[in-house]
Amino acid sequence: MPAFVALDGVSHAYGGAGNALAVEGLSISVETGEFAAVVGPSGCGKSTLMKLATGLQFPHIGSVQVAGEIIRAPVKIAGMAFQAPTLLPWRTTRENLLLPLEIVQPYRSQMRRRKKEFRQRAENLLASVGLAGQGEKFPWELSGGMQQRTSLCRALIHEPKLLMLDEPFGALDAFTREELWCVIRDLHAARKITIVLVTHDLREAVFLADRVFVMSARPGRIVVERRIELPRPRDIDVTFTTAFQETVQELRSHIVKARA
Amino acid sequence: MSRTATIVKLSPWLFTIGLFIIWEAAVRIFNVPEFFLPPPTAIAKAFVDFSGPLYRNSLITLESTLVGFALAVGFGLLLGLLVGWSRTMYAGLYPLMIGFNAIPKVALVPILVLWFGIGFVPAVLTAFLISFFPIVVNVATGLATIEPELEDVLKALGASKLDIMRKVGIPRTLPYFFGSLKVAITLAFVGSVISESVASNYGIGNLMLQAQAQFQVPLIFAGLVVLAVEGIVMYWLMVVLERRMTGWAQRSGFAQT
C-alpha cells in the first residue's frame, strides 16, 4: 500500500529556525485507509504533527507528503476536530456543518445552487452519528458529547480523504468517550478514510488504531511503532481482554521511557 | 405572574420613587436650604415653570449626542476591525489610542472651538471623541479572541483571512460591539454636555450653567434629571438592540435569578 501521509526526516521550530525545535527528525508514514494513532508525553509535538500534515505549517528540514504530493499549502482534503468542539454559537447545528462547504471548493461556488442537497447531506451525517433531527438546535442546547459528535460531522461534511483528530474525546466523561470511540470506529469502517488520531489515552489508541506511534519528549520524533493486531470489528469488550491490556502496558512502558 | 416576578418587574420604579421620597424627607428633616440641595418637589416645580426651555435644550443635547455617537459607532467599528485584522496595526495604533483616551476630553473643547467655533459642532465632536474608544477596544478584542483551533479548521480548508473574518470574526465580535454601545452612549452624553457647558449657547449643559449663574438651583437639578432620563432611555434602546441582534450570546440565567 502506498503511504497516504508521509513525513520524512522532518524538523520544525515555530517562529523560524533558531527557536527550540518542536519536532526533530520526525518520520511517519500512514497508509491509505489506515487508522493511525500517535501517543506521547504532553508537549511532545503531537499538535505540530497535525499542523504539518494539514499544511498549516511547513517544515524547515525534511518533507511532508499527502496523497503523493509535497505540501506547500493547506491540504483542503483534510478534516480536523479538536478537544474543544469550537462550534459557532450563532449557527444551528446544521448550519455549523455547512461551514466547511462555504469555504472549500468546489462546494463553495455551488453553495447557492445545491443548498438543499447540502442540507440533506448534513442531516444524513448527523443521523449517522446518532444526532438525527438535532440540526435545528443550537450548539449550546446540546450536551458535550453531542457537540463533539457535531464537531466530527463538521470535519467530515466535505468528504475529506484524511481525518485529523487532536484529542477529540479528551474533555468528555468516560462513558461518553467510549460511545464516541464506537462512533469513530464505525465512521472509519464505513467511509474507508485515512485517520490520524493524536491522543494521550493509550486505551483509546489501542482500541481504535491499526498502528500506534509513540513519540518522544520534545523535540518529538517517533520512538516506537506498534501494529495492533486485534481483529475488527472491535467491540468495547475487547478492552477487557488480556491481549488488549498487555498492549496498553507495553505502550505505557515506552511512554515512561520517552518521558525520562 | 408570580409574586417575586411582579416585584422584580416593579422594582425599578419602586427604587426610583423610594430614592426621591428619602431625598425629600432628608431635605425636610434636616432643613437643608433650597439653594444647597433642592427637594424633589422643588425640582418638579422647576420642570413645570421651565418646561419650554428644558424641552428645547434637551432635544439639542440629544441631537448632538446622537450625531456624535453615530460617528463614534462608524469610526469605532472601522478602526476596531482594522486593529483586530492586523498585528502591525494593533501594535502601532494601540498605544496611540490609549494615550489619546487618557487625555481629558474637556481639555480638547477649547481647541475644537478654535477650529469650529462654539455650538453644535464641538458638542458633536466631543461626544464622538469620548465615546469611540470603548467601541474600538471591544471590536478588536472580539476579533483577537477567535479560537485558534477554529482558525486552523478553516485555514486547513484553504480559507482566506477575509473568509475567516466574514464567517467567524465579525459574527463573534457582535456581542462585544453591542455591549460597548451601552458604554459609549452614556459617554457620548458626557461629551456633549461638557462641550455645551464650556462652549455653547444651547443645550442642557448651557442651560445648567445659566441656571447656576442665576442661582436657580432647582433648575440645575431639573437639567440633571433630564440628562439621566435621556441616558436611561438611550441605554435601554441599546440593550434592546443588543438582545435583538445577538440573542444567541445571552443565554445565561444568572442575571435573571
Image: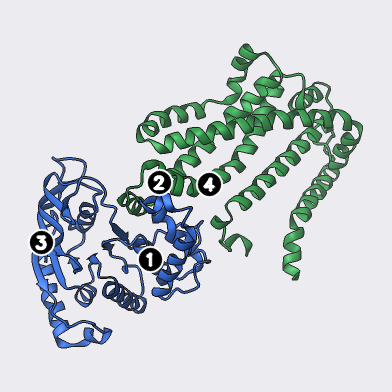
Q: Left or right: where does residue A91 sit relative to residue B152?
A: right
**Residue type pointed to by label 2:** Ile
- Callout 3: 10 Å neighbours few (<14), some, many (20+)? many
Chain of the residue that carries numbered disc 3 in the rendered image: A
Chain bearing tag 2 is B
| Residue at 20% over, 59% down | A46
| Number of the front mark, 1 or 4 | 1
Tell me the colour chain B is drawn in: green
Q: Nearer the viewer, residue A236 or B42?
A: A236
Rounded to the nearest angstrom, the CA distance separating label 2 from label 4 is 15 Å
Q: Do the residues labelled 3 and 1 touch (CB within 8 Å)?
A: no
Whether discs 4 and 3 lie on one chain: the answer is no
What residue is at 23 percent from the left and 50 percent from the top? Answer: A55
Please, what secondary structure does the residue beneath circle 3 have?
Answer: strand
Chain for numbered disc 4:
B
Q: Name the residue under label 1.
A: A153
| Circles 4 and 3 in contact, beta carbons < 8 Å | no
Q: Do the residues labelled 1 and 2 touch (CB within 8 Å)?
A: no
Q: Chain A is drawn in which colour?
A: blue
Q: Which mark is residue B174?
A: 4
Circle 4: residue type: Leu
